[in-house]
Image (cartoon, rainbow, N blue to C red):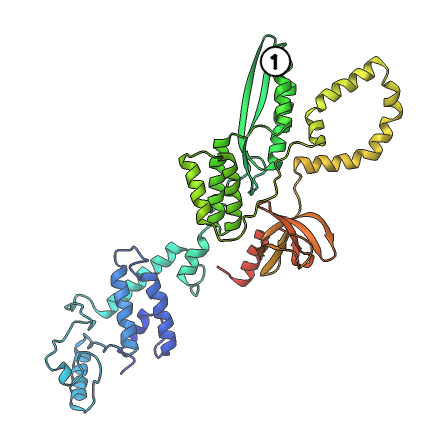
Amino acid sequence: MNTDRLGVYYRMLNVAPGASAKEIKLAYRKLAFEYHPDRNTDTDSEEKFKDITEAYEILTGERKAPAQPANGGANRSNNQSNGDQAKPGGAGYGPNAAGAQNANRTKQGFAGSGRKPEKDKQTAEDKFTRANQAYREQQAKANARKSNIHPGARRHSRKKADSNAHGFIQCAVTGVVSAQPRLVEFKIVHGFLNAYSTETISANLAPKGAKRMALKASFKTWLQGFWGWRSFIPAWKAILGNMRGGTFPPEGNSKMLFAQANAFERSGNKPLARAVLMQALDFIGTNRSVLAEQIRASLRRLEDGKPTRRVRDEWKRAGMFDALLHLSPLFVLIFAALIAFGPGQGFVTRKIPDLVARQGSEITKQVKQLIGEDREPYYVDRELLNMREGPSVNDKIIRRLIRFETVYIAGDNKDFWIEIETTIGETGFVNLDALVPGNGADARDAWCATNKCD
């Protein structure tokens, strides 16, 4: 078949005349993906899809090309058609093929696949021009960077990653996702002369965030709660309550933990979802409410026959150092009184400088750890990395860390093992040589920019 007659179909698929079957197939797949009616919402996408399908079937021999609309071309096509019918075995494919199977068959339209003939409304050249113009408009809308990038890949690359796609509950102070968050309430007392008021602040917090908020509430009470004689006792009660970790409303905590367990289940971490549901069940107790039944039903659904693993409880009462921080304004007042009245003056002049020189660096380090100074992140540089309960291959595997997952150093290294903490509060031991300093998200973006990943 003459290549000039098929030129319009080669141009429809944007391939050179005489292209190989593989090139034709790749070009057709690219255009079909773009103009498929299920993907493209333009009004003329269906017609464009039929046009490129027709061009592909004609160039691959599945369908016979129609006669040229021009006079000379029509005469030549008729002569050639008559010659082909006269030859034995001529025109051996398509709807015009000779043989008994097509003796009573009605000649179909331009496409030969059930479509109606266009009756000279437009030539093939007009169809190509219109399709080419629509293709350029589509490329301009998509802001195509390169013509050889698959349209689906361009749409995928424009999507921004959702940092919290699974709906995790984050700490209101630190912003981290914890396996054991709590809804915590703290008290702040305001007093002046004969009047006082109590303010309750509450938030979803991780253990470290709860310590920071407790300190903030206590210092506000110290500054504002002792200016009246009626607020003296309530202020002390508020400070002691904040020092003990605040209060945990059972109903609010059970709802919040149920939502956090659902987020872990959506992310694929079913063991941790079960552990969080067990914490929610501790708050709900023997209650038979709708929420309690939903929690028990979720536990039964996640049951896999293995013993339920509980996370390490970090919600313990404040230690001695935390209590000293809460009560520090009182010690400041006592210290100032000793200096003012004389008995402690010699102690200040002789002992304090040496004590500050010896213990200053250690106290500063402890304060930074308590208030949550940012730790340097590391990321996993292997496809899969086992996190174990202890520094040995004989210890139980907690879970497998994926490549570019961000972790933090939680302890000293032991031989080739080091204790880490994940972003969701899990702790365990991994091989030291599998960690690289830096943020995992930034490392993955750099790797994708080099390797052109989706």
Which is more toward the observer, 139 or 224?
Answer: 224
Q: In the image, residue 258 lies at what x, y percent?
A: 47, 40
Which amino acid, by three-letter code, is at mark 1? Ser
Which is more toward the observer, 395 or 255?
Answer: 395
How busy is the neighbourhood of tag 1: few (under 14 within 10 Å), some, or many (20 plus)? many
Asked if 317 appears above or below 311 in the picture, the reply is above
Q: Toward which corner of the image does residue 154 lie, by quadrant?
A: bottom left
Residue marked by disc 1: 231
Q: In the image, residue 335 lies at what x, y percent?
A: 79, 20
Looking at the rendered image, the quarter that the N terminus falls into is: bottom left
Which is more toward the observer, 46 or 406?
Answer: 406
Residue furthest top as drawn:
194
Asked if 152 appears above or below 289 in the picture, the reply is below
Residue name at image x 56 percent, y 48 percent? 309
Q: Toward which corner of the image does residue 292 lie, by quadrant?
A: top left
Residue name at image x 20 percent, y 76 percent? 66
Q: Toward which corner of the image does residue 136 lie, by quadrant?
A: bottom left
Asked if 139 appears above or below 212 in the picture, the reply is below
Residue 7 appears in the figure: yes
Name the side, left or right, on which 302 lies relative to 331. left
Residue name at image x 63 percent, y 32 percent? 211
SS at mark 1?
Answer: loop
Residue furthest bottom as drawn:
88
Q: In the image, residue 57 lies at what x, y percent?
A: 28, 74
Which is more toward the observer, 71 or 142?
Answer: 142
Name the side, left or right, on which 238 lies relative to 330. left
Q: In the image, residue 82 lies at what x, y percent?
A: 15, 86
Asked if 450 appears above or below 376 in the picture, the reply is below
